[in-house]
Image (cartoon, helix red, strand yellow):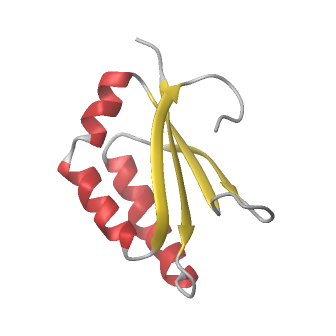
């Protein structure tokens, strides 16, 4: 099976930037890595009506992505993110080189 990308977008809640960035470094990234997922790209929107952050992770195959998204650990991470971000969305797409949205 071919690799897939987990694309995630969100906005940081107003006034929570410092808390969010600490969470991102100390909890979000290490938790994903513990689940076998490493972020491969991240973009910050500085102009326009798009989500403030877009992050992607490459996952070896669709079955692995499904296991991740069905796990309690993923649900727990989402619950923690809810305290700091708005409009959190994600999707899984077939991986190809370069920027994908």
Image coordinates of residue 32 in percent, x first then y, are: 38, 50
Q: Nearer the viewer, residue 27 or 7?
A: 7
- Indicate the quadrant where residue 59 lies: top left
Name of the residue lying farthest toward the right? 47
- Residue located at (29% from left, 32% from top): 66
Name of the residue lying farthest toward the left? 72
Left or right relative to 101: residue 7: left
Vertical arrangement, residue 43 with respect to residue 80, above or below: above
Image coordinates of residue 27 in percent, x first then y, are: 38, 66
Vertical arrangement, residue 55 with respect to residue 85, above or below: above
Vertical arrangement, residue 66 with respect to residue 56, above or below: above
- Residue located at (29% from left, 66% from top): 79
Name of the residue lying farthest toward the top? 1
Image coordinates of residue 89 in percent, x first then y, are: 47, 52
Specify the quadrant that holds the C terminus. top right
Left or right relative to 18: residue 73: left
- Residue located at (52% from left, 84% from top): 16
Image coordinates of residue 60 in percent, x first then y, are: 42, 24
- Residue located at (44% from left, 72% from top): 23
Left or right relative to 97: residue 71: left
Q: In the rendered picture of this protein, how many numbered marks are placed on residues?
A: 0
Name of the residue lying farthest toward the bottom? 15
Specify the quadrant that holds the N terminus. top left
């Amino acid at each position: 099976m071919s690799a897939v990308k987990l694309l995630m977008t969100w906005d940081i809640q107003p006034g929570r930037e410092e808390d969010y960035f600490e969470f991102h470094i100390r909890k979000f990234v290490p938790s994903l890595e513990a689940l076998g997922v490493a972020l491969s790209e991240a973009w910050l929107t500085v102009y326009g009506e798009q989500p403030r952050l877009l992050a992607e992770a490459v996952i070896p195959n669709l079955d692995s992505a499904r296991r991740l998204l069905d796990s309690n650990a993923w649900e727990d991470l989402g619950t923690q993110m809810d305290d700091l971000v708005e409009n959190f969305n994600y999707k899984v797409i077939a991986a190809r080189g370069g920027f994908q949205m």
